[in-house]
Image: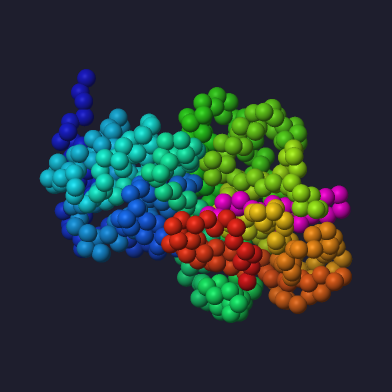
């Protein structure tokens, strides 16, 4: 049996790294595509040589991880890093199967005569295709102190779980979520046209947002819900014509039918698929293990495991319930479920328009999806016999509610004030809750509404979704500059 020749491996390395031959001025793949707003802090972590850690970029499929790696290569070349000190390897390429990371690195060093102390930038794309990748990467970080290692991977379950076990203190992880609504508007070139931005005098570094054309902004918000979470869908007219085929076959099916079964040894793939389909249809709604078991035909204990797998793969997020006094339940039998990207629901069950019945739940899903890089650690929903509040943030110290948001894709609560009774009830039971209470609408903006002694602010859902993406990302960048400080307890950035 023939083995892959060393010369073939070296030839492939040269093919994958065309800047070795073309030089710094040569074109790099995807360099003409716009950069995601997450690129700045990600690239800064790569060039910060004072921190001896590998940078691990995680996230769901097709959100732009590989493109961001190539953007980093372009930025390194533009900052006068010699082309022969940058290595890119996609471990999905069959020729690298069975090779250790160090063996690949040694081939690179051999080609150019690099010593162990040479400053190198090494990118391992799709690293989950290497068994026990985290052991290999940790060894490289410990052994090659002058090299910067970057890894990406879509199989978030393997990346997250194994990184926590074996890479403690060696890896800095970044999660690249689907496009935020702010990024979507930037990508289609309508951000400046549809968004007006002014800095908040009371909160420097935080901005207030409005729009000169709410109908046009809402039209783009609906487009965002249907296909806008994926960069390729935004740029490709063919994909936009049939986003269901692209998203379902290339993203959902690969995770459900290949990644998760291979990671966890799942034998009944159709069982997992039925559960996910049920959850996707109910995004933005409260579910329970009991009702899920009955509707999907899957045992409750199995559902618990599957939910963990689906969350680890960045397909969905569970949000815990609290009661009217903001108390958490000892046994969380009910919870809300959100797709991490609202476009997945449209792909499975058809696109919506602004008047579709499912717009309320999908709007709520989109707003929760803007919070992903903050990990939604302090966000809950409150529900009791006579009412519900969609988003409640609890203080990390005493677990008291700090702010709340009621999400609507309707102007009705502005005109029928009795629909705000649930908010009034919750405020009276939790007097420390910050006012005004934000209620999102379809078109109404009003910062000064009083009802039964409670202050309310109405703001269109599209503006709120934009503001979350823009302000959270800005605070995320600041936090990363402050030694990776957490942004999970950010205030209600609703302006």
In the rendering, at what x and y percent does residue 370 appear? 58, 58
Q: Nearer the viewer, residue 269 or 248?
A: 269
Q: Residue at x 53, y 77 (%)?
A: 193
**Membership of 109 in magenta stretch:** no
Q: Is residue 112 left or right of residue 451?
A: left
What color scheme is it?
rainbow
Q: Main secondary structure of the magenta part?
A: strand
Q: Is residue 49 left or right of residue 202?
A: left
Residue 88 visible to the viewer: no
In the rendering, at what x and y percent does residue 278 appear? 67, 39
Q: Residue at x 18, y 52 (%)?
A: 84
Magenta-tinted stretch:
373-392
In the rendering, at what x and y percent does residue 266 appear? 54, 27
Q: Say which quarter of the image contains residue 256.
A: top right
Location of the N terminus (image quadrant): top left
Q: Residue at x 50, y 66 (%)?
A: 474
Q: Is residue 191 above or below residue 363?
A: below
Q: Residue at x 49, y 57 (%)?
A: 485
Q: Is residue 80 left or right of residue 409?
A: left
In the rendering, at what x and y percent does residue 397 appear? 65, 54
Location of the C terminus (image quadrant): bottom right
**Membership of 381 in magenta stretch:** yes
Residue, far top: 1
């Amino acid at each position: 049996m023939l083995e892959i020749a060393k010369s073939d491996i070296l030839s492939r390395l040269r093919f994958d790294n065309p800047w070795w031959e073309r030089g710094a001025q040569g074109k790099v793949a995807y360099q003409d595509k716009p950069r995601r707003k997450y690129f700045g802090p990600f690239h800064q972590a790569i060039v910060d040589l004072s921190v001896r850690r590998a940078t691990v970029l995680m996230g769901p499929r097709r959100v732009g991880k590989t493109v961001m790696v190539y953007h980093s290569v372009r930025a390194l070349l533009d900052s006068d890093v010699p082309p022969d000190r940058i290595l890119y390897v996609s471990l999905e390429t069959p020729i690298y199967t069975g090779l250790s990371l160090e063996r690949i690195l040694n081939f690179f060093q051999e080609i150019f005569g690099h010593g162990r102390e040479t400053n190198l930038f090494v990118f391992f794309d799709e690293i989950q295709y290497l068994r026990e990748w985290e052991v290999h990467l940790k060894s490289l970080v410990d052994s090659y102190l002058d090299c910067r290692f970057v890894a990406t991977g879509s199989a978030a379950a393997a990346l997250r779980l194994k990184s926590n076990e074996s890479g403690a203190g060696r890896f800095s992880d970044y999660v690249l979520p689907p496009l935020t609504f702010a990024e979507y508007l930037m990508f289609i070139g309508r951000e400046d046209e549809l968004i007006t931005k002014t800095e908040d005098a009371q909160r420097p570094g935080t901005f207030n947002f409005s729009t000169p054309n709410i109908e046009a902004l809402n039209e783009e918000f609906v487009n965002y819900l249907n296909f806008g979470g994926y960069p390729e869908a935004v740029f490709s007219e063919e994909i936009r014509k049939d986003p269901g085929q692209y998203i379902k076959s290339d993203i959902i099916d690969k995770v459900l039918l290949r990644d998760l079964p291979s990671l966890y040894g799942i034998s009944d793939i159709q069982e997992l698929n039925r559960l996910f389909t049920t959850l996707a249809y109910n995004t933005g709604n409260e579910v329970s293990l009991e009702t899920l078991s009955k509707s999907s035909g899957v045992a409750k204990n199995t559902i618990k495991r599957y939910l963990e797998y689906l969350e680890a793969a960045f397909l969905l997020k569970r949000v815990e319930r609290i009661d009217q006094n903001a108390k958490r339940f000892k046994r969380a039998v009910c919870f809300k479920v959100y797709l991490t990207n609202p476009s997945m629901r449209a792909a499975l069950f058809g696109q919506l328009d602004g008047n579709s019945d499912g717009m309320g739940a999908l709007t709520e899903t989109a707003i929760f999806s803007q919070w992903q890089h903050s990990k939604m650690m302090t966000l809950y929903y409150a529900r009791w016999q006579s009412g519900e509040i969609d988003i409640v943030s609890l203080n990390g110290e005493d677990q008291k509610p700090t702010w709340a948001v009621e999400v609507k894709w309707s102007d009705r609560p502005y005109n029928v004030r009795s629909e705000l009774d649930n908010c009034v009830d919750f405020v009276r039971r939790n007097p420390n809750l910050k006012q005004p209470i934000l209620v999102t609408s379809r078109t109404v903006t009003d910062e000064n509404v009083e009802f039964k002694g409670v202050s309310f602010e109405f703001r269109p859902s599209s503006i709120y979704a934009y503001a979350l993406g823009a302000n959270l990302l800005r605070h995320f960048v600041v936090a990363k500059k402050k030694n990776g400080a957490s942004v999970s307890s950010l205030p209600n950035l609703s302006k």
